[in-house]
Image (cartoon, grey):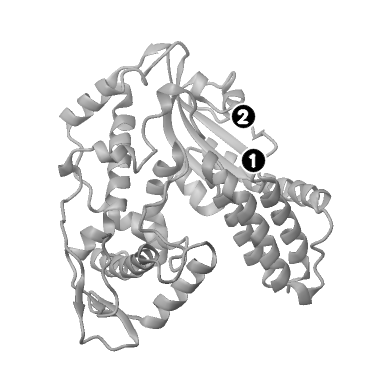
Amino acid sequence: MLRTGPRYSRLLTLLATVACEPAPTVAPSPVGPAVVTEEIPDDVFAIAGGVTIARLAFDEALAKLSASGPASRDDRGLRQRVGLALVARELVRLELVRLGVAEAGEVTRRALPLLSALERDRPTVLPTWWSVPPLAAEEFEAAVVVAAEQLAVVTDAELAAEYERQQQRWTSEKPWLRLDVWTLRYDDAVGVAECDAYVAKYRRCSQKFPAVTQPTVLAELSRQATEWRIRAEDAEYRELLHTECAAAETEAMQQTSSMGCDWGSDATADERKATAARRAERRGAAGTARTRLAAGEDVLAIAASLGGLAAPRQMLAADELAKPVLAATRGLALGKTSKLADDAHAWTIVRLVERYDAGTVPLEAVKADVAEDLRTQRLAAALEALPTTLRSKYEVKLHASFESLDEGP
């Protein structure tokens, strides 16, 4: 649920905003370039915390990344980015073991509320060291969990100061509502013509795939559409998506040429049918979510088992609410759960927790919200600094042919 308007430009330009945070909020960990040594074998890129990273893993990731854009494999910045991502991945794995949360289900459970906080106001801005490839989307959960361990406790004095700084944000001419919101999207529309054409044609092509692989393929397609939709919110990147999605279609056409897929004709009508089918299918999950919300179950637990985006216990002025959410709150009594709301893109359900009159909502009513704002800002800072933080705790050695993991002239 995205907020709009000038008073909501707080928080998640995440990595830009956090530059203003005081240093003690994230454990300081200055570190110089990783050790370069001749002792590492030629088939090894690096040894991070005693874990060997093969040269082949670095070369393959670099080749894939350079092939997706104008950068050369010899570009130092690109090499640093891939190298830092590979090293960070191994150090994050070591930290998870140290924390005793290496089991995937536990990582996801811990990550869910953190990711929900990062995504609530606007989609998460990935840290500058993040690189796909070699990293996979699910590895972001692990990085977030480890980054959260670096955060300092928010004090009462910091809460009061942040509340004063946010005074305008907590003042509205409209009533205030604290809500639990659960949203399940069934529409993969990106809003960029070339991207929407690719999604529609690939979904149609997936019907040629073996039945056992179709769910995985379609899940990955939805993930890709979501990533594009997030990036399309940036006006500059939105322009690049026209070319990126057209290139993705050309590549997919070549990869599936032997399967008899139709990439030449328009698939808009097919996509409308597919969307209608997903809408009907996911109505069942939405109904289950509504029943569980009405029974008082935690919205994050519902999202963990049914999917969708959970936004727990948000305090928002009525004019901040997305239209389907606002419509769902009309006539809703305290503690009650709304009917299913459908905005032609997603099912949404709302539970009304608290209501306050228009004006300035008191600090006592929004302490948890202000604390979460601070923690989220600090989490973004810790996530950005994570490779540096971990490299201060573990020894990292690079092959002598690799210059450094740090930016330089």
Number of numbered tags placed on the structure image: 2
The residue under label 2 is which amino acid type?
Answer: Pro
Residue identified by numbered label 1: 346
Q: Is residue 387 left or right of residue 140?
A: left
Determine contact: label 1, label 2, CB under 8 Å: yes
Q: Residue at x 53, y 62 (%)?
A: 69
Residue identified by numbered label 2: 324
Query: Closest to the observer: 233 or 160?
Result: 233
Q: Is residue 399 left or right of residue 317?
A: left
In the rendered image, the vertical position of residue 210 relative to residue 375, given as above or below: below
The residue under label 1 is which amino acid type?
Answer: Ala
Marking on residue 327: none
Residue 194 in sight from this viewpoint: yes
Query: Closest to the observer: 74 or 392?
Result: 74
Quarter of the image with the C terminus is bottom left
Q: Residues within 10 Å of mark 2 (few under 14, many from 20)?
A: some
Q: CA distance from mark 1 to mark 2?
A: 9 Å
Q: Residues within 10 Å of mark 1 (few under 14, many from 20)?
A: many
In the rendered image, the vertical position of residue 38 relative to residue 287, given as above or below: below
Residue 58: name its quadrant: bottom left
**Extreme residue toward the front, this view:** 409
Q: Residue at x 18, y 72 (%)?
A: 395
Q: Residue at x 31, y 88 (%)?
A: 42
Residue 352, percent from left and from top? 49, 27
Q: Residue at x 41, y 63 (%)?
A: 139
Residue 142, percent from left and from top? 36, 60
**SS at circle 1:** strand
Residue 320, percent from left and from top? 49, 24
**SS at circle 2:** helix
Residue 222 in sight from this viewpoint: no
Residue 289, percent from left and from top? 57, 43
